[in-house]
Each structure stands twice: as C-alpha cells, then as structure tokens.
Image (tube, rainbow, N blue to C red):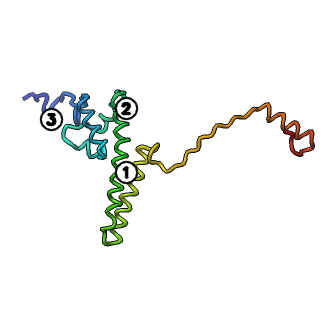
Amino acid sequence: MPRKAGKAGHGKVAARRIGRPPIYTEELAAEFCKRIASGRSEASVLTDAGMPSHPTIWKWEQTIPSFATAYARAREQRASALAEEALTIADGVGHLSTSEAVQAAKLQVDTRKWFAAKLNPRIYSEAVKVDANVSINFGDIVAQAAALRRNGGGEAPE
C-alpha cells in the first residue's frame, strides 16, 4: 500500500515554518513597543499571545526603519520605567525587617539602575563625559622646538 504524502513520518512533507508567523503590522509593532515602554522585558512580552518571536523582532528591527525607531524609543522609555521602579523599591526599604530583605531590595535597585544606564546611557549613565576641543598648529610646535634648540634647551620665547 503506498504511503500518503503530507503526514508526519510518511513520505515528503510540505515545508512549514516553525514558530509564530512573522507578519508585520503597524498595530502589532505599536503594541509590542507599548509593552516594552511600560517596563516589561522583551522576553516577557514575546511570551504573550499574539506577539512575534525574537528572530522576528530582530528582522523587523533590521528591515523596517520605522519599527527600529519606535523600538529604540520604547527601550529609552523602558529605562525611565526601570528608574521609577528602582525609586519605588528604595522607598519601600524602610518597611523591611531583615538584612536579607534589605540586601535583596538593594540588588533589585542596583540591577534596575544598571540596566537603565545600558538602555539609555545619555540620561542614566554615571559615566562622566568630557568634551574638549583642542586645536594644535603644527607650525607653531616646530617653531617652538627650533627656538628651544637655539636657546640650549631653555624655555622657548613666547
């Protein structure tokens, strides 16, 4: 009796994609970004019904400029949500009764601060940025070096 095609394990099976369909819509992208901006992690949002997979999000980010912009903005807003969470956790430390609970709260605050700085370093990073504009005229340096040689290594005249 001949095998029936199309059944798993029997003959050739039509190629099917595994996972969720990568269908892009403005509404789906906006909902995804809204959930990220509220402070949720990508991993938790992507487990929600109707949400795309990680590879789909990465593909959208690479191929759809409007999504890439919205996603970047959502991550910046997520940093603000994390900073607010850190304040809420820190404000609640006074009610904790054990040092273990205080240490756990400190870890939560530090983790949120660190991640907020990674998501939006312009606002939340503790790094000090120095912006200096130095102008050097090579001709002036050569002239000063020549003057030093003429003076026997003393100070160059101004």
Q: Which residue is pictured at 30% across the width and 39% down the height?
A: 54
- Measuring from the top left, give residue 30's x and y in whole percent: 27, 33
Q: Which residue is pictured at 27% across the width and 41% down the height?
A: 35
Quadrant in the picture for residue 141: top right
Quadrant in the picture for residue 49: top left
Badge 2 is on which residue? 69
- Measuring from the top left, give residue 124's x and y in whole percent: 44, 48
SS of the residue at dot 2?
helix
Q: Quadrant of the N terminus?
A: top left
Neighbourhood count class around disc 1 (C-alpha, 10 Å): few under 14, some 14–19, many 20 upward: many
Tell which circle, 1 or 3, labels the residue nearer the N-terminal end: 3
Name the mark nearer the viewer: 2 or 3: 2
SS of the residue at dot 3?
loop
Badge 3 is on which residue? 8
Q: Which mark is residue 83?
A: 1
Q: Which residue is pictured at 32% across the width and 57% down the height?
A: 88
Name the mark nearer the viewer: 1 or 2: 1
Callout 2, which amino acid? Thr
SS of the residue at dot 1?
helix
Q: Nearer the viewer, residue 99 or 46?
A: 99
Determine whether 128 is above or below 14 in the image.
Answer: below
Quadrant in the picture for residue 70: top left
**Side (left or right) of 133 relative to 152:** left
Q: Nearer the viewer, residue 49 or 138?
A: 138
Q: Quadrant of the C terminus?
A: top right
**Side (left or right) of 47 relative to 86:** left
Tell which circle, 2 or 3, labels the residue nearer the N-terminal end: 3
